[in-house]
Structures are given as structure tokens and as C-alpha cells.
Image (cartoon, grey):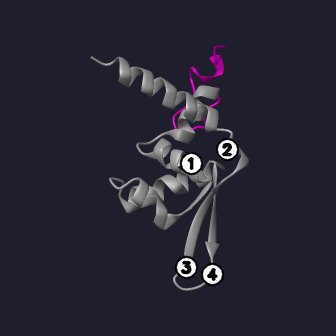
């Protein structure tokens, strides 16, 4: 892999430029990859469907992770009018492009788990 010399002295708070850093910033935070995994499985999901798939995840963290993925352009938020209002999340092309990354993470994690003593 190529070196990212321009990132050696990146000031705190600035946007990452190294491709690995960009990916980690998008997927950063506990639960973010698992929220993305659920959206990849389903293609789209209502907000109310996600806690069933990730029961240990609090509503606040779920909201934060969905907002993070939306801000990164990975997910689009759609609100259906009516009462109660319904919100569902759909992967963007950028989000669907993360599928091979998530698949590689799955494969690596499976191999490490299965090799554990």
C-alpha cells in the first residue's frame, strides 16, 4: 500500500486524507459496522426494525450511528408523513460500495475466531 505522507502532520479536527483513515472515520465507533451490516442485509430498514437485530444497542447510540452514516453519505434517511411518523434508512451507492469491505471484515473475523484456542 502506498504511504500517505501528507497525513503525518494532519492537525487535529481536520478531515483525514489517507484512504484507510477515511474508511475508518466512516466506520468508526462501536456499533457502526454492525448497523451497516444490518442495512446491507436488508437493503433498507425502518428505524424500528434495527433494535430487534441489535438488541444490546441503545436508542441513543443507534440514532447517533445512523446520523454518522447519513453525514458520511453512506445512508439516506427517509421520513414518511403521517402519525406516527415513520423513518427508514436506505443505503446509498457509497454505502453499497462498502459491501466488499464488510465482507472482508466478516471473513477475517471468522478465520480469527475459528483459529482461537
Looking at the image, tell me whether mark 4 or mark 2 is earlier in sequence order: 4
Kindly indicate whether the residue at mark 3 contacts the one at mark 4 (C-beta within 8 angstroms). yes
Looking at the image, tell me whether mark 1 or mark 4 is earlier in sequence order: 1
Kindly indicate whether the residue at mark 2 contacts the one at mark 3 (C-beta within 8 angstroms). no
Looking at the image, tell me whether mark 1 or mark 2 is earlier in sequence order: 1
Give the number of callouts: 4
Kindly indicate whether the residue at mark 2 contacts the one at mark 4 (C-beta within 8 angstroms). no
Examine the residues drawn in magenta and state their main secondary structure. Answer: loop
Q: Mark 1 or mark 4: which is in front?
A: 1
Badge number at residue 81: 4
Circle 3 is placed at which residue position? Answer: 85
**Label 3 neighbour load within 10 Å: few <14, some 14-19, many 20+:** few
Which residue lies at the image location 52% right of the left edge and 50% below the top edge? 38
Q: Mark 1 or mark 3: which is in front?
A: 1
- Quadrant for the N terminus in the image: top right
In the image, 22 versus 33, the foreground residue is 33
Q: Is residue 3 magenta?
A: yes
Circle 1 is placed at which residue position? Answer: 41
> What secondary structure is found at the residue carrying circle 2?
helix
Q: Give the range drawn in magenta.
A: 1-18
**Label 2 neighbour load within 10 Å: few <14, some 14-19, many 20+:** some
Amino acid at each position: 500500500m502506498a504511504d500517505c505522507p501528507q497525513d503525518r502532520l494532519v492537525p487535529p479536527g481536520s478531515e483525514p486524507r489517507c484512504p484507510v483513515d477515511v474508511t475508518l472515520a466512516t466506520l468508526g465507533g462501536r456499533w457502526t459496522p454492525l448497523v451497516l451490516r444490518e442495512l446491507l442485509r436488508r437493503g433498507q430498514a425502518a428505524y424500528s426494525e434495527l433494535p430487534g437485530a441489535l438488541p444490546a444497542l441503545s436508542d441513543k447510540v443507534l440514532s447517533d450511528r445512523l446520523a454518522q452514516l447519513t453525514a458520511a453519505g453512506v445512508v439516506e434517511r427517509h421520513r414518511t408523513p403521517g402519525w406516527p411518523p415513520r423513518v427508514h434508512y436506505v443505503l446509498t451507492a457509497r454505502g453499497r460500495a462498502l459491501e466488499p469491505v464488510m465482507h472482508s471484515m466478516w471473513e477475517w473475523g471468522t478465520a480469527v475466531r475459528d483459529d482461537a484456542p
